[in-house]
Image (cartoon, coloured by chain):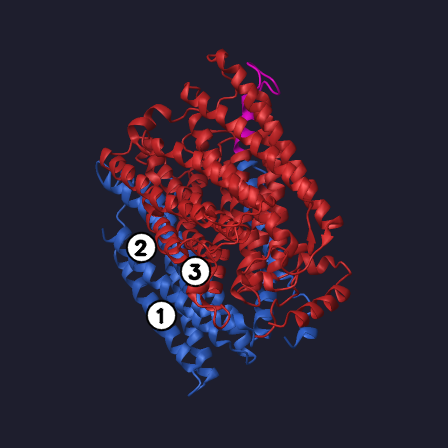
Chain colours: A red, B blue
Amino acid sequence: MSSTMVTGSVETHHAAGSGFSLKEWVFTTDHKRVAVLYMVGAFAAFLVAGIMAILMRTELASLGPTVTDNPSAYNTWLYFHGAAMILGYQIPALTGFFANYYVPLMIGAKDVAFPRVNALSVWLFWMGIVVALLTFVIPDPPDIMWTGYPPYSIITGGNTAFYTFTVLLMGFSSIAAGVNFITTIIYMRAPGMTWSKLNIFIWCTLAAFIIQIIFVPVLGVAVTMLSLDKYLGTHFFNAAAGGSALIYENLFWFYSHPAVYVIFLPAVGLIYEIVATFARNRIFNHMKMVYYGIFGVLALTGVVWAHHLYTAGIPNWMVLIHVFTTLMISIPVGLLMIGLVGTLYKGSIQYATPMLYAAGFLFLFLIGGLTGIPNAMSAIYMHLTDTYWMPGHFHYVMAVSMTTAILGGTYYVLPKMTGRMYSETLGKLGFFLFFIGVNITFMFTLIMGVKGLPRRYYDYQQFPELEWMQQWATIGSYIILLGALVVLVSWLHCVFFGKKVGPNPWGSRSLEWTHAPRPPSGNFGGR
Amino acid sequence: MNGHAHEMKWHTSYWPLLVSVGILFLAPLAFGFYFVYKMPMAAFICLGIGAPLVLISIVGWVREGLEDEHGYSVGLSVWAMPFFIVAEAFLFVGFFAAYWVTRLTAPFWPPPGTPDISMAVPIVMTFILVASSFTIHLAEEKIEDEHYDRKGFIFWLVVTMVLGTVFLGISAFEWTELYHHGFTFGTNVFSSSFFSITGFHGSHVLVGLALFLCMLLPALSGKVNKAFVKSASIYWHFVDVVWFFVVSQLYFW
């Protein structure tokens, strides 16, 4: 490809497109702009849900009421924090923002298969955010965590309907995006872009979307039944009439466990891209990672959900099967980690900010993964379930390690999106604050769990001896908040004052970096 | 790398955003006002905002789609439809799974309050729906390149739509009958599944009919999009297949 020609045409584009047109943003169907819309929505959700976490941590900083004396308010924060972090931030950031930005550029396509459907996906996601945010203005907001278990979600005075509709809107958005991106990846690869040449991020995204189109509908059914039961008087989950709350729990986790892999796979794909670029190395056994790692996760993803239900009253044979499958799925996941370490091996590693995040990912995911293995075993699970151990584990494995991937991935893509370089000082400062903060908070969370502190409560009168640990966890959360603000400042600094850079500041060998920064509408041109 | 001057313009469309806003009013807000906050007036206002927005957006979207007939997306829709159908199939899997578990763990079946449900009605409905699958296939054949016949296409499309409408009519008749026998949404666990699944299937028939209407109106003025017809027809066959599960599981088991 003649880079001079590309650069030349992009320069004219800058000149022509220098005027900001609101219409071209709001009604856009271009995948790169849809990506930005996803990014703004996802990080807005991250910020608001993060503030909820700060409120909860502050409440827990001392015994007795601290911020509020109303436990229902705490429940609402808990609801919003979980629902918005997973449905509003992690899934849209990874399968919305990054998938939109990267997939067409990495496979050499003009856009996604259905640009208008793509715009529909992002706006349905935004409507989901709107319904979720209504939590703060409506009377009787939802107070049912992000899981919405009956019977409480049916008998509560809270607004379960808005929980249902948040999930449905985000779900429709995900299904539309899934159909769109699977079609794009299969049918819109550039000539010569064979399956074996695809970036590992593309494979991860493809697998994540396959999981989405299979499992999201089941969650949609579960939450629909919830509102039917509550508002239209059906008896799906009403034990008195012969229904069962266990049906909800099974349907819910049948999606919501695979949702972990919907988040994990694109995140690990991003980390692979970053590690390969900054270690100046080939991906360790690239196709084996795809076949055994990614496909392994895909094969097992639908048969591990019941490990969330060991103590819910399911039959023993079902517990036994899920102990085995759950331990088994740690093999492909572990393989993907080994691939990352193998890619680092004998590489010439350059610790720019994205690489720091990737290294942070390896550490945090290791702790998250290792704390997960005892959970898989039902006998140990009995003692750990419903204690702080569980939030400690899933914050390590899912919340913070995937966030390192999202933040690191954003730093990695910024020069492409903006044509400017971020400040390494701010980037590194943000990373270290975040990394130190999460370890303080969630190490103490894990330890409190082993000490038997039950989760979800807004107070802990029976455990006064744990107050000092709670305080450390709260201090950690303030450090995380500070780190997040530094990250935000560094991004804004990059967008407005960053130093201009060329097409490939990282020296990556991947296709999307051959293109000049701020690719124009239509990407590579041609058909 | 030629043709850049043309591609400098960013592509836009009004309809995705407008239809999303319409859905926001039509579903969460209207439902919330009516069922949660018991404010019917506010709910009707939301319906009044949402329904026109959604309808206008669909019309606008279809027109826009027919305009760029040579866009690359058009041909791809036939290949994308199977993936969409996978998602749709799992919606029904969810409902059926709940029904199977409830039924297989029940001490006795059917639960009290269930009247005798006529077997004749679903058999008639099955014939109608299967017939409509054939007629849409005939319509599809009329727009093949070798023997393009727009009038014939319109004829078979209308026949399909009539059959679909009759199907829905019988379904509505059956529902009212059952309702008069005191068998409603909240009667027992069977009625919950029965009305959810048949209603859910019926809503798919309705969506299919809406798709056909979106093909019929442009076809009257000479615009036929083959890929659109093919995709809608695949969807219709899927709705037909699901019906076999509905009949076998709800009526004949």
Q: Secondary structure at mark 1?
A: helix
- Contact, mark 2 vs mark 1 (Cβ under 8 Å): no
Residue shown at 55% from the left, 53% from the top: A98
Gap between marks 3 and 1, in whole Å? 19 Å
Amino acid bearing label 1? Ser
In the picture as drawn, the residue positioned furthest to the bottom comes out as: B146
Q: Is residue A291 above or below residue A402?
A: below
Q: Is residue A373 above or below residue B201?
A: above
Read off the residue under disc 3.
B84
Q: On the image, which quarter does residue A60 sit in? A: top right
Amino acid bearing label 3? Phe
* Residue A74 covered by magenta stretch: yes
Find residue B246 and name its label: 2
Gap between marks 2 and 1, in whole Å? 17 Å
Q: Chain of mark 2?
A: B
Amino acid bearing label 2? Val
Q: Is residue B120 above or below residue B227?
A: above
Residue shown at 65% from the left, 40% from the top: A487
Q: Chain of mark 3?
A: B
Gap between marks 2 and 3, in whole Å? 20 Å
Find residue B133 and name its label: 1
